[in-house]
Amino acid sequence: MMNETELEVKKIVCEAGKRLSTSGLVAGTWGNISCRVDDDTMVITPSGVNYDTASEADMVVVNLHNMEYQGQHKPSTEVGLHAKIYLTRKEVNAIIHTHSMNASTVAAARREVPPILDDMAQIVGPSIRVAEYALPGTKKITNNTVKALRGRNAVLMANHGALAVGRDIEEAFTTCLVLEKACKAFIEAEFMGGAKSINKFEAHIMHQYYLRKYSKKKR
Ligand SMILES: [Zn+2]
């Protein structure tokens, strides 16, 4: 039987899916969202279902340890990656994976984004790393992405897209937008003669300050 919390989280993920599809960050059913239920469980968007017409019942409850799932649809193919992040990052309660335009461009160039904007440094961290390339849906891409995400709230996946995390779904959305903006600013600043970076140590301090000042408990 499904418990109250699972139902609540399904609703949050379903609404977030609709918001993602109108945000301009994804095309069609590309991209996926999940939220943590507890230490052992998450809810993730289903594979191949249109978010605009999806209902709460279409969202998939997944066991973080063995990927067993309940629901009428298969979970997103990137389910293993989401699960590993919840298992290794206890403070993370929401994950959004997109193939947004500017993030994809930087991911294709495989360039680490230095701390070029204050909001990026605060919310994402002192840089945006690029996870080494591996085939989507494999253990290798999961491990590469988790490694590159260390100490950050967002990461680029080489030749693929981007992933953002948050302590709740609001924060994950904000991180997604700040990441996309930072990637756009990076591309354009490089064309204007080169992006100039903030001091990396100061960027690190800004991120730590943000995490403490805006500490969140809710999902
Ligand atoms: Zn993807």
Image (spheres, rainbow, N blue to C red):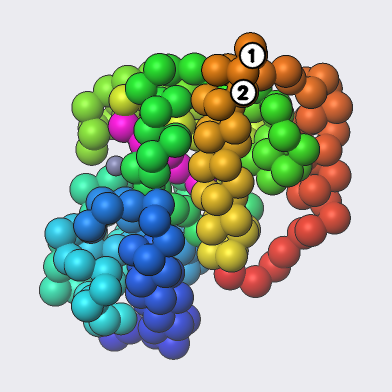
Secondary structure of the residue carrying tag 1 is: loop
Q: Name the secondary structure under disc 2.
A: helix
N-terminal-most mark, 1 or 2:
2
Which amino acid type is marked by label 1?
Answer: Gly
Q: Which mark is residue 194?
A: 1
**Residue 210 placement (x, y as % from top left):** 80, 48
Task: Look at the image and tell me in which quarter the C terminus lies.
Answer: bottom right
- Count the numbered circles shown: 2
Amino acid type at mark 2: Ala
The stretch drawn in magenta includes residue 140: no
Which residue lies at the image location 60% right of the left edge and 46% below the top edge? 178
Most distant residue in the top direction:
193
The reply to whether residue 13 is in sight is no
Q: Specify the principal SS of the magenta part.
A: strand
Q: Is residue 159 left or right of residue 130?
A: left
| Ligand 1 image position (quadrant) | top left
Instruction: Determine contact: label 1, label 2, CB under 8 Å.
Output: yes
In reply to whether residue 161 is colored magenta, the answer given is yes
Residue 148 screen position, x and y as percent: 51, 26
Q: Could you tell me if residue 202 is visible in this image?
A: yes
Coordinates of residue 55 in the picture (x, y in percent): 26, 81
Q: Residue at x 56, y 26 (%)?
A: 188
* Residue 155: image tag: none
Q: Which residues are magenta?
A: 160-164
Considering the image in quadrants, where does the N terminus appear? bottom left
